[in-house]
Image: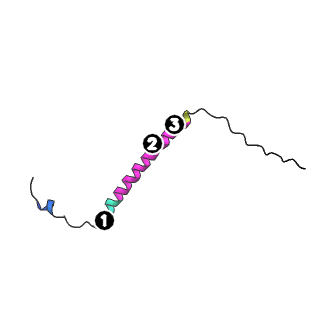
Amino acid sequence: MTVTKEKFFKQGRQTLQDKASATDTAAKQITATENADREKKTEKLRALRLAQPEAEPIKPATKRRHKTK
């Protein structure tokens, strides 16, 4: 283990551009991961839906007429 100044002392301040770039990169990575997860879930649900047998269309309920007195 070599003792160097860089290991013990901070390297200087980051510029605002460096901070913004790091934040932007992290946000894009998180968004990409969420999009990939959503796509996987969508594909899984689509496959399950297509695997189900087609159901007959539901007939709308007819209105009942009230008897008049």
Q: CA gap, disc 1 to disc 2?
A: 34 Å
Instruction: Identify the disc placed on residue 40.
Output: 2
First along the sequence among labels 1 and 2:
1
Task: Give the amino acid at mark 3.
Answer: Ala
Q: CA gap, disc 2 to disc 3?
A: 11 Å
What crowding class fits label 3: few (fewer than 14 Cα within 10 Å), some (14-19), or many (20 or more)? few
Task: Give the amino acid at mark 1.
Answer: Gln
Instruction: Identify the disc placed on residue 28.
Output: none
Q: Residue placed at 55% from the left, 37% from the top?
A: 49
Say what secondary structure mark 1 lies in.
helix
State the extent of the magenta-drawn residues as a range: 24-49
Relative height, residue 8 to residue 60 (above, below) = below
Q: Tell me if residue 10 is in the magenta stretch.
A: no
Q: Residue placed at 67% from the left, 35% from the top?
A: 56
Q: Residue placed at 57% from the left, 33% from the top?
A: 52
Say whether residue 59 is left or right of residue 14.
right
Which quarter of the figure has residue 9? Answer: bottom left
Image coordinates for residue 5, horizontal then vertical, percent: 12, 62
Q: Are marks 2 and 3 in contact (CB under 8 Å)?
A: no
Which residue in the rendered view is the most extreme toward the front?
69
Say what secondary structure mark 2 lies in.
helix
Q: CA gap, disc 1 to disc 3?
A: 45 Å
The residue that label 1 is drawn on is: 17
The residue that label 3 is drawn on is: 47
Instruction: From the image, state whether disc 1 or disc 3 is nearer to you.
Output: 3
Q: Tell me if residue 26 is in the magenta stretch.
A: yes
Say whether residue 26 is left or right of residue 55.
left
